């Protein structure tokens, strides 16, 4: 994609689209981790709440593969009601 002629509004739209895609990917990751389909919205909230508990409050902390797995494992242990 050519970003040379992008305006601020174009970047805002691109960020919005990427945010939606990331939210969808988290839903899929939680679903394949065993979250009941009817509990996905609640699981997303629990995931976001659990990030600080598992990773700390470091604003600059990386959120890569290992960190995502750590949060999901934490949820599986603390929020069994969300999982099949």
Image: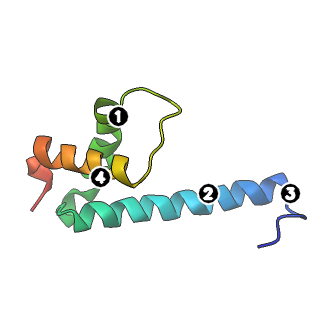
How far apart are the alpha carbons under marks 3 and 1?
35 Å
- Horizontal side, residue 58 vs residue 74: left or right: right
Q: Which of marks 1 and 2 is in front?
A: 1
Query: What residue is shown at x 41% (from left), y 26% (from top)?
Result: 57
How far apart are the alpha carbons under marks 2 and 3?
14 Å
Query: Label 2's element?
Result: helix
Q: Compare marks 3 and 1 and give the one earlier in the sequence.
A: 3
Q: Compare marks 4 and 3 and give the one earlier in the sequence.
A: 3
Residue 19 sits above or below residue 59 on the image: below
Query: Label 4's element?
Result: helix
Residue 62 sits above or below residue 38 on the image: above
Q: How crowded is mark 2: few (under 14 residues within 10 Å), some or many (20 or more)?
A: few
Q: Are the residues tagged 4 and 3 within 8 Å (C-beta)?
A: no
Residue 84 sits above or below residue 1 on the image: above
Query: What residue is shown at x 48% (from left), y 36% (from top)?
Result: 61
- Horizontal side, residue 5 vs residue 43: left or right: right
Q: Compare marks 1 and 2 and give the one earlier in the sequence.
A: 2
Expressed as whole percent of the image width and height from the top left, the position of residue 46 reads: 27, 42
Query: Which residue is disc 4 drawn over?
Result: 69
Query: Which residue is disc 1 drawn over?
Result: 55
- Horizontal side, residue 82 vs residue 25: left or right: left
- Horizontal side, residue 68 vs residue 14: left or right: left
Q: Compare marks 4 and 2 and give the one earlier in the sequence.
A: 2
Expressed as whole percent of the image width and height from the top left, the position of residue 67 reads: 36, 46
How far apart are the alpha carbons under marks 4 and 3?
36 Å
């Amino acid at each position: 994609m050519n970003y040379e002629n992008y305006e601020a509004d174009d970047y805002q739209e691109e960020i919005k689209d990427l945010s939606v895609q990331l939210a969808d990917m988290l839903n899929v990751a939680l679903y394949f981790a065993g979250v009941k389909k009817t509990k996905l919205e609640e699981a997303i909230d629990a995931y976001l709440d659990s990030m600080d508990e598992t990773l700390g409050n470091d604003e600059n902390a990386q959120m890569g593969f290992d960190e995502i797995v750590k949060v999901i494992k934490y949820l599986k242990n603390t929020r069994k009601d969300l999982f099949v």
